[in-house]
Amino acid sequence: MALEIQQFTSSDPDFWSRVDALATSDAAERPEVREAAESICRDVRTRGDAAVLEYTRRFDRREDVADIDALRLSPDAMRAAYESLDSAARSTLTQTHDRLVRFAEQQVATSWRITDELGCELGEQVTPLDRAGLYVPGGKASYPSSLLMNAVPARVAGVGELIMVAPTPDGAINPWVLAAAHLIGVDHAFCIGGAQAVAAMAYGTETIPAVDKIVGPGNAYVTAAKRYVFGTVGIDKLAGPSEILVICDGQTEVDWTVLDLFSQAEHDEDAQAVLVCPDADYLAAVRDRADQLASAQPREAIIRQSLAARGALVQVDDLSQAAAVANRLAPEHLELSVADPDALLSQIRHAGAVFMGRHTPEAFGDYCAGPNHVLPTGRGARFSSPLGVHDFQKRTSLIKAGPEAAAALAPLAGHFADVEGLTAHAQSARLRGGA
Amino acid sequence: MALEIQQFTSSDPDFWSRVDALATSDAAERPEVREAAESICRDVRTRGDAAVLEYTRRFDRREDVADIDALRLSPDAMRAAYESLDSAARSTLTQTHDRLVRFAEQQVATSWRITDELGCELGEQVTPLDRAGLYVPGGKASYPSSLLMNAVPARVAGVGELIMVAPTPDGAINPWVLAAAHLIGVDHAFCIGGAQAVAAMAYGTETIPAVDKIVGPGNAYVTAAKRYVFGTVGIDKLAGPSEILVICDGQTEVDWTVLDLFSQAEHDEDAQAVLVCPDADYLAAVRDRADQLASAQPREAIIRQSLAARGALVQVDDLSQAAAVANRLAPEHLELSVADPDALLSQIRHAGAVFMGRHTPEAFGDYCAGPNHVLPTGRGARFSSPLGVHDFQKRTSLIKAGPEAAAALAPLAGHFADVEGLTAHAQSARLRGGA
């Protein structure tokens, strides 16, 4: 069968509308999903463990589970999973872990303090969160790499306790997830998922500790629950379908580009793979070759559906216009598959992660390069950042005025407070001014 | 009349429950507020300017306004407001502005890149947002200081365009807000507010530009609208009632402590002022003196209502226990009104801003000290930070592997992808490994 994927070019009169149409800008959940998720959150908040148990038995088909304690994952189980890996597997896990740690260590913010010309000390104290909750999806999307990506920055930030939740539909759990949890040193782990797990970590139950922030991807119910509890706890971001935009100058091996597009498209039917290139012949070659190679892919059906529904081959005038397309879409993953990626990078304003040069496929970033694979989707790179140590640290402003600095600041604060009609503010300030 | 405020002590058996009860942990909006706000958001998204105009005419009693252009604030009006200030006023505004700028400049993050032992380049590119929306409340809470606090970090971050919205109920606007807008150099300003203004900036209308992030406090409708549009745009935080917690060793002038508590309580009936002290006599003295001084306050009624509803005098064993109370409540504002504030600071894990020593009242931080006065409320300091330059910058991860680094990373990524059953990922990685 022929490859189904839309193609358009900068000479089309509706070029920019078609570019914009590629974005999934609607962040709001479907109303029925949201109502269900919020109802579960309220119920878990009220009834605690009993509600969590009921939802887990029902949604994860865990009628075998008699009480909440049976849903706790023991440290022994996690250690056993780690120790049962062969040495090659253990090496892949630890090498990846260590590369993530070294990258994250570059992101650690430190406290600072300065003394200004009035003698007033000003600064910020940086501290880690007490407790973070890690959501690991269950079923086919239960990825050990996601656990590492979420947990490593928390550990490097110095978070006191890590709570992991992972649904186990029909009782199944990925042994690599358990092994990764052991490597990370997760403090508490529970076989629960969905909105009920998010609510349990946000509000706490008799058994499950309340956390300060919840991170990790999940399905639409998880995302709706995260939006609902946001404010009671911090959340990382509202994860949408994954995306790649490949800018290619037409000189990269065709197979490399095709497989890079597939590596996004194979995630699920909603994933998006877009190729932007000034070379019409190259686009045609990619199209043909993609059709051949797709037939050999185990996930062929998903790849074809994803490319048909959301993929695109976009012909541009030149690489500068390709950069403009990227900035418009602010893609989660951006490959600069060109001869001089640094030159092109200088034109990129919005992207989650940039993969520079023909030898840097997105797959490196998904696993072992070092930077986080939890990235803003759905144009979120316009205003947000990859998950990192900064998500698990917070700042406290510091102000320390002695009598002299206070005497200088008092009239300024007093005057401003007068203007705003806040008398007690003004008096409080002026009392320190000796007035 | 006697001062009405709850008082309790560490010897009470329910001490920690009473501490916890001081927190306003419920971040969810009332359902009817949320439904109204979301309905307005959807309407503005669909009908654009026409909807914004209708809601503004109705909610702000602006039947005088015929079209959306009449709601645009001209640069001339802002300049005229600035120029009409007397020199003392202008000096207060510019001195405050300059102090905020200097503090914010300390927060600027910069791009970085390292080369690892494989020869792989890794780093982060830091870029500003293209466009930020500043929400300035109207009516009695229309504070020029809030505009400065929200706008300065955006400017220092290098945000391309600043859009300001401020409702003008009955057509009234604070001239200092206009003057501050001129000083900041706001690019577009509109006399609109409420959920309709949030939606207009999130989705854009024919007249009002779509922004990438919306910051600034507002009422419950504004907060609900911000939660709704979160994801389509970034938001700063969901602002709750303002709070102060004063830890005092009992040696600070009683009037100073009383006025510091009042400076919080005078904001509104929901504001919270808590004094934590190991000295029973001092607490009694504060209580008596507060009753006397309240009677002389223009905002006496609000102060008394706030202290009665949400205030507290808390007697603790010692300053370490006071720090434990503070960490439990994670207050927005924390005064360490003690002889050695640095020693006590080392025990503080969670607070929005810390005011160190007897000569540093919160009022300095509300205006001119330098740090931002937009701070996490409702225990949000457990996981979030004061508004700052980092809210207007975002990071893009960078990965650049040449042929040699790619050859080293390819088997690692390939193995991990095999484990996760993602064949195209594995092939995409291995193609770069020469395999």
Image (cartoon, coloured by chain):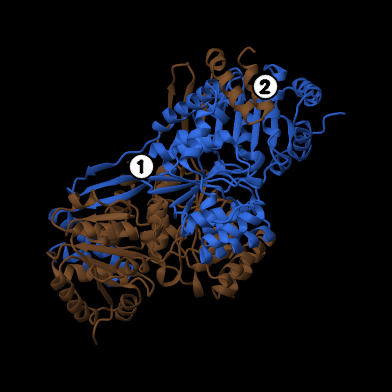
Chain colours: A blue, B brown
Three-letter amino acid code at the position of disc 1: Gln
- The residue closer to the viewer here, A109 or B213, is A109
**Chain identity of mark 2:** B
**Chain identity of mark 1:** B
Residue B185 sits above or below residue B31 on the image: above
Identify the residue at horizontal 63%, vertical 55% (top origin).
Answer: A57
Q: Position of residue B129 (x, y in %)?
A: 50, 43
Residue B67 visible from this viewpoint: no
Residue B330 sits above or below residue B115 on the image: below
| Mark 1 touches mark 2? (CB < 8 Å) | no
Identify the element where label 2 is drawn.
helix
- The residue closer to the viewer here, B106 or B349, is B349
Q: In which quadrant of the rendered view does residue A427 lie?
A: bottom left
| Residue holding disc 1 | B107
Q: Position of residue A231 (x, y in %)?
A: 47, 58
Q: How many marks?
A: 2
Q: Position of residue B262 (x, y in %)?
A: 27, 71
Residue B358 visible from this viewpoint: yes
Three-letter amino acid code at the position of disc 2: Gln
**Would you say B235 lies left or right of B99 here?**
right
| Residue holding disc 2 | B427
Same chain assignment for discs 1 and 2: yes
